[in-house]
Image (tube, helix red, strand yellow):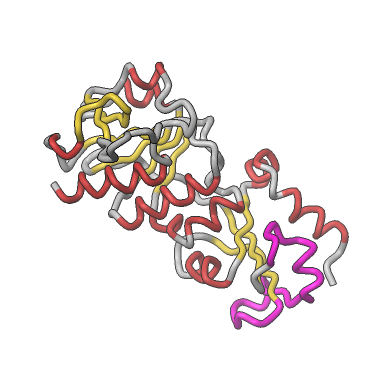
Amino acid sequence: MLSKNQIKYIKRLGQKKFRLQEQVFVVEGVKTINELLQSHFELLQLYTTASFNIDAKAENLISENDLNRISFLKTPNKALAIFKMPKSEAIDLEGLVVAIDDVRDPGNLGTIIRLCDWFGIKDLVCSKQTVDCYNPKVLQATMGSITRVNISYIDLDVFLKDIKIPVFGAFMDGENVYATELPKKGILVMGNEANGISKQIEDAVTKRIAIPRFGALQATESLNVATATAILLSEFRRK
């Protein structure tokens, strides 16, 4: 049985401030935990209702009731693990990099991380206002892809000002991406769900691109940021 202190500690890891203080994070679900176990991420504790047959010091068999008490999900998925946060690696500017400006929805960020993995994007650069990639909901949405994408949280405007490669920004009034010549090396900036790319970041963009609307009425205001990222990355890779 878990102690009150153990339960309190794990539940506090739902808060960004406490995660950063402890430099650890929670992952739930057998599939995602297995992905992290096979990566460079360091396991600290594993709580399961059935044995994973790994290091006995890290594995703790608990009841379903205890799992319900520490889970951040509506329907707990047999296992919860605590991993150590890895250090971000140097950003590689020799390929395509995705930069995120103030994306707040955990599901959107998790999907974008998964898209980066799918399209072979090694580096994802996030503004400091962007939702924490170790938020339990973000991790759930990545489905393990977080192990294969180098994620950095930095002052995005400072970073972009010193860049010597093309900086592409997604805008409603940009150039039709299907008619745009796209390089193999550059940075693709995606903006906030409601407000798009901020003015400060917009000043660093060297090429404005857009996904054209084909509907007869053209009444839809915009695309979801994760959906737009998928379309744009597909175009960059196709060309």
Identify which residue is drawn at 27% across, 46% down.
233
Kindly indicate the quadrant of the structure image that contains residue 190. top left
Residue 195 position (above or below residue 238): above
Residue 118 on the magenta span: no
Identify which residue is drawn at 80% across, 63% down.
69
Asked whether, in this view, residue 138 is left or right of residue 19, the answer is: left
Q: How many marks?
A: 0
Residue 67 on the magenta span: yes
**Depth order, front residue of 181/215:** 215
Asked whether, in this view, residue 118 is left or right of residue 54, the answer is: left
Q: Main secondary structure of the magenta part?
A: loop
Q: Position of residue 23 (x, y in %)?
A: 62, 47
Identify which residue is drawn at 34% across, 43% down.
229
Q: Position of residue 74 (x, y in %)?
A: 70, 61
**Depth order, front residue of 73/184:** 73
Residue 85 position (above or below residue 204): below
Asked whether, in this view, residue 18 is left or right of residue 215, the answer is: right
Tell me the quarter of the image containing the N terminus.
bottom right
Residue stretch in magenta: 49-75
Residue placed furthest toward the front: 217
Q: Position of residue 215 (x, y in %)?
A: 29, 40
Kindly indicate the quadrant of the structure image that contains residue 65. bottom right
